[in-house]
Image: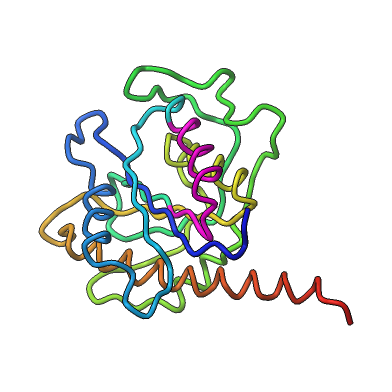
């Protein structure tokens, strides 16, 4: 991955099961309208992912190969959530639920032979402490749920050497309109990019001759 990349890729998911409108994609669309702010010298690219294991695997490879982003942020919906959850890690095993085509990964495994857990380079606990969004609780999570969101996250962490994040948002409601979720994503991703830059600066410093 090119550590000097000035691109961030943000994805949301399409419809699945009874959720004909997926709040994750609606939030990402709002984020695209808002942008990341004029002070952020980072190109924002957005993409809708299908709730389909096989297609997601292909698209994640292409995201990291074609765009080489500084950070990839994947947004999913937690259908029972009343807050926004920042997921710290992706898990390799336990994918038993079928996707929109009824497909399940063989053996319930994301990446055969891969590590059981891959942890993001970004400290989600730190991001939660730094974020204050009116009327929205932002909290830490260590279990992304073993469905297509978690599967996506694990693959992205693998291909991006840990420079990925997964944000779970609640379903759309009177309390959580798309506009509010979009503003929350903007604030969270700005903070993540700042943290990501610090991580990269520290890593680069270690390589400099004394």
Q: Is most of the magenta stretch helix, strand or loop?
A: helix
Residue at figure coordinates x 56%, y 18% from the top left: 106
Say if the magenta span includes residue 91: no
Q: How is the image coloured?
A: rainbow
Image position of 120 with respect to 100: above or below: below
Name the residue: 54% across, 45% down: 64
Give x and y (percent) for residue 30. Answer: 21, 59
For the C terminus, the quadrant is bottom right
Q: How many marks?
A: 0
Q: Which residues are magenta?
A: 56-73
Using the image, determine if residue 198 lies above or below residue 189. below
Expressed as whole percent of the image width and height from the top left, the position of residue 82 reads: 27, 57
Name the spot of residue 102 as percent of width and height, x first: 36, 17
User: Within the image, what quadrant is residue 91 found in?
Assistant: top right
The structure residue drawn at horizontal position 67% and vertical position 27%, both measured from the top left corner, is 112
Q: Kindly indicate the quadrant of the structure image that contains residue 65.
A: top right
């Amino acid at each position: 991955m090119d550590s000097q990349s000035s691109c961030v890729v943000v994805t949301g998911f399409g419809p699945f099961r009874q959720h004909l409108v997926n709040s994750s994609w609606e939030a990402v669309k709002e984020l695209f309208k808002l942008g990341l702010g004029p002070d952020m010298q980072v190109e924002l690219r957005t993409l809708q992912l299908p709730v389909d294991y096989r297609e997601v695997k292909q698209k994640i490879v292409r995201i990291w190969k074609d765009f080489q982003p500084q950070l990839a942020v994947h947004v999913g919906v937690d259908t029972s959530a009343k807050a926004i959850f920042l997921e710290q890690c992706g898990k390799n095993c336990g994918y038993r639920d079928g996707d929109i085509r009824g497909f399940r990964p063989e053996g319930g495994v994301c990446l055969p032979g891969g590590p059981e857990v891959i942890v993001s380079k970004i400290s989600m606990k730190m991001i939660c402490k730094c974020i204050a969004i009116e009327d929205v609780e932002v909290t830490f999570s260590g279990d992304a749920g073993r469905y297509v969101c978690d599967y996506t996250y694990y693959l992205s962490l693998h291909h991006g050497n840990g420079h990925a994040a997964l944000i779970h948002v609640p379903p759309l409601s009177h309390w959580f309109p798309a506009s509010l979720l979009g503003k929350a994503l903007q604030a969270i991703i700005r903070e993540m990019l700042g943290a990501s830059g610090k991580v990269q600066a520290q890593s680069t410093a270690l390589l400099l001759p004394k």
